[in-house]
Image (cartoon, grey):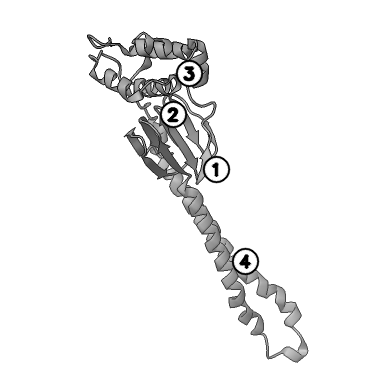
Amino acid sequence: MTREEGGVGIGARLRAARERRALTVLQAAEKLHVDARVLEALEAENFEPLGADVYVRGHLRRYADLIGESPAQLQDLYTNASPAARPDLTRIPRGERAPDSARWLLPGLLAVIALTLAGLLWWLFTLPGAKPQALAPVAATAAAAAAPQEPAAAAPANTAPAASVVAARAAGAGAAAAGPTLTLKFSGDSWVKIADARGRTLLDGLQGPGSTRSVSGPAPLRVVLGNAPAVAMEVNGRPASLAGLVRRRGDAHLTVDAAGAISPGGRGD
């Protein structure tokens, strides 16, 4: 893109404001935690290497705030300038899913559920029955010949606690299967895509400043943030740091496991 005819271009205003602050390009880049080539491209009005519009606008706003320029005026200049053809980096192609993994996923899940239910039923019906047998030698006396039913009467008292323990364990297992909950708060425009372990898309699209989104699904959750510096993330209600996960151009690819731990993700996640 080039500057507007008859006026001062974006690059000239950025350069002049930076020089008024007595900053070099390298010094400004260090303060913004970006590559110096990003600021050089902005001052040269060479926006193509910066990617999609959302990235260019994000870099313009942060640079303008640092050097005391007007972000709104620079955004208007950028909007009114004649657009050049740039690749749309917000559309990240999905990697092809291996056919074998999709074919065996459902049978494997059903087998795990069946084994879990069988173990719970075995535990429920065998554990309460063992305790009355242990009481039989104690109750077997000559004077208590007419009272063999007392151990049987104690069985219902033992059954209730056992059933409550089973219910508590089942509830805990259900909560773990639900997966972590992510809450995203946006201070600027950012494209976001989140998918769960089943490949289901939980969130996909451009989010505006001031918006908040919350999603949950089976772990691991795969997350792609187009403008990561404009996103504050919480995992299960706790703030999560993106330090070390943001790439040079401002995007981030990461994975959140069932315990809420965050790790770098691949480009195709």
Amino acid type, mark 4: Leu
- Alpha carbons under labels 2 and 4: distance apart: 53 Å
Secondary structure at badge 1 equals loop
Which residue in the structure is indicated by mark 2? 228
Which residue in the structure is indicated by mark 4? 127
Camera-near label (2 vs 3) is 3
Camera-near label (4 vs 3) is 3
- For marks 2 and 1, the one nearer the N-term is 2
> Badge 3, how many Cα within 10 Å: few under 14, some, many 20+?
some
Mark 2 touching mark 4, by CB under 8 A? no
- Alpha carbons under labels 3 and 1: distance apart: 31 Å
Q: Which residue is drawn at 26% across and 11% down?
A: 7
Which residue in the structure is indicated by mark 3? 34
Which residue in the structure is indicated by mark 1? 259
Amino acid type, mark 1: Ala
> Residue 188, position in %: x, y?
38, 31
Secondary structure at badge 4 equals helix
- Alpha carbons under labels 2 and 1: distance apart: 22 Å
- Alpha carbons under labels 4 and 3: distance apart: 62 Å
